[in-house]
Image (cartoon, grey):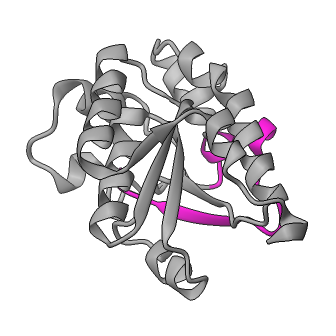
Amino acid sequence: MQNGFISKGGSYDKLGVDVSNYKAVIPTISKLINSCRDAKIPIFYTQAVREKSGIDLLTSTHRILPKLREERIKTSPICVRDTWDADIVDELKPAATDHVVVKRRDSAFQDTEIDVWLKSLRIDTLVFCGIDTSICVETSFRDGFNSGYDVILISDATASGNREHYESTLGIVESYYGLVMKVNEFSRHLPIASNR
């Protein structure tokens, strides 16, 4: 949920990508985060980052990339470190008690410290939200499941630029990986912090 993907003037907006679906889920994600904070559930943000030097961009590590993805990266590297583009949107800024995982791939698990953090907190269930449902969210979801975590996808707190891809991800998750539910249903299952 970074400016580069969601905000007016961000990289996606400059590339002509319709970001309205992404912006529309901000209030629902905020509601989910607040519900989890009230229940004392740890919050983990992922922050996609590209380096100013261009090291480790997908175009320098892959010989074969889908044309659309390659064109976007070459036209304007998205979410370059220490830029407004890479910042998490103001409406969802992490609190001091939240954790921010810097990632350079689609998955929150690949080459990051998230698994160590989760294990140190004895977390066994992961709840996913964010964008793009069929890319970063699904890739992280699968990796979480395959790392032994139970997984839940909050369908109205995720968004995709392609409705078919979004629906496909929901079906795949329900059939093979975990639970899919809306934020109101999920919130009904949360403990009240004082009664935990």
Side of 136 relative to 152 (left or right): left
- Most distant residue in the bottom direction: 120
Q: Quadrant of residue 2?
A: top right
Residue in the picture at 43% in, 32% down: 76
Q: Quadrant of residue 84?
A: top right
Residue in the picture at 15% in, 51% down: 62
Depth check, front residue: 147 or 48 = 147
Residue in the picture at 47% in, 50% down: 152
Pinpoint residue 63: horizontal percent, then vertical percent. Answer: 9, 47
Pinpoint residue 28: horizontal percent, then vertical percent. Answer: 69, 31
Q: Which residues are magenta?
A: 82-108
Total labels: the figure holds 0
Magenta-span inclusion, residue 123: no
Side of 88 relative to 123 (left or right): right
Pinpoint residue 21: horizontal percent, then vertical percent. Answer: 55, 17
Question: In the rendered image, which quarter contains the C terminus?
Answer: bottom right
